[in-house]
Amino acid sequence: MAKYVRLIDMERCMGCRACVAACYTENYFTPHAPWNVVLEHEIGTYPNAQLAFMPVNCMHCEEPPCKKVCDAIGVNAITKNEFGVVLIDYDKCIGSKYCIAVCPYGVPMYNESVDGLYPDGKTTPYEDIAFSDRHPTHRKKANVVEKCTFCWHKLEKAVAAGKADRIGKDPEYTPSCDVVCPVNARFFGDIEDPDSEVAKRIGAKKATQIKKEYGTRPQVYYVLEGGDF
Amino acid sequence: MIKMLSFLMVAVIAVPAYAGEAVDLSKLAKDIRNGKIDVGTEYSVDYNDDRFHKIHADTLGLNCSTCHAGKQYQPDFVLLRKYEEEAGEPRRKLDRAPCLGCHQAGGIATTWYSGRATK
């Protein structure tokens, strides 16, 4: 079974936020609940200062604490499917925010309201698409928690078309944030396939998961300056 | 080392709430799980009648700054500002390291994190 992972190369990321914009347009952005953000951190002191950029989206952990806590309180709104993608069912979510409390990466976001994106009340072409015509992960609701889905609507399409081998290669079947990166700082694919670009780069660049001490085993790897530690 | 420090931090911070008496955190956690200590039924973290703050702030006696480490509190926050909602603070900044002390595998509370407990 394929295991899809993402690689983010912080040595290459220049903080342009194209991945953030791509996520916004692909996934019906709601201002209260961004799925993809870029954290900035200043390193060093003048004149040897620099900015480090760290794109953060859901880590799709192999042992997701968000799912554990959601199941423990009997809500069962969070699932992890056979491809390793962690998803939230908006219809089951009660908005307890327990998943937000336990996620060490600060990923799940509570959507207080589904507001229009234009200030004058007009709607964007995306907002005009009927609720029922959208993928379930895009049927945004107020007072529930949302997060990155690894663009599950695209992966699902590849699997249904028997083109799972094209995931990570064909833009149609690859998460949008990974497609648009202008500096090749993001890769997506099957880590179980030794010939995949993502598997090769994770090995070659000594990419690592972050906050390993939590034992969550994230499916997003980062190339950090200096390699793994 | 991080796990050990976070556990010690939780333990040390919890003690002042029970000044003068020995606190057995594992017994307290067990009593919460068994329903011997009433922490309500409201699964929420929203500061009002929620289980989350009843468990961690009321029962265990953790100070706000244990988790809300990035927030600047007034010196009297323990007395006056304990339940004041942080204004506009990004949740992303909340530190989850203290959670590891009790919620890791082998810890005294329900296990959310599979990292092994410090011996």
Image: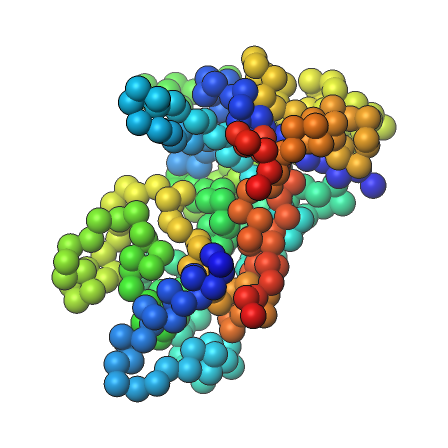
Give the colour scheme shown.
rainbow
Identify which residue, B89 or B99, lies in the foreground.
Answer: B99
Quadrant hosting residue A65? bottom right
Along the horizontal axis of the image, is A154 left or right of B74?
right
Give the residue at x 25% y 45%: B87
Residue A204 point in image, percent of width and height: 70, 28
Identify which residue, B34 or A137, lies in the foreground.
Answer: B34
Give the residue at x 32% y 68%: B13
Along the horizontal axis of the image, is B57 left or right of B96?
left
Along the horizontal axis of the image, is A91 left or right of A96?
right
Residue A53 makes an appearance in the image: yes
Q: Looking at the image, is B29 positioned above or below residue A222? A: below
Q: Looking at the image, is A177 positioned above or below residue A136? A: above
Q: Looking at the image, is A149 positioned above or below residue B59? A: above
Along the horizontal axis of the image, is A72 left or right of A51?
right
Residue A51 point in image, percent of width and height: 39, 24
Residue at the farthest top position: A182
Give the residue at x 38% y 23%: A50
Residue A156 point in image, percent of width and height: 73, 32
Callout count? 0
If the image is split into quadrants, where does the C terminus of chain A sit? Answer: top right
Identify which residue, A28 or A116, lies in the foreground.
Answer: A28
Give the residue at x 27% y 75%: B16
If the image is split into quadrants, where does the N terminus of chain A sit? Answer: top right
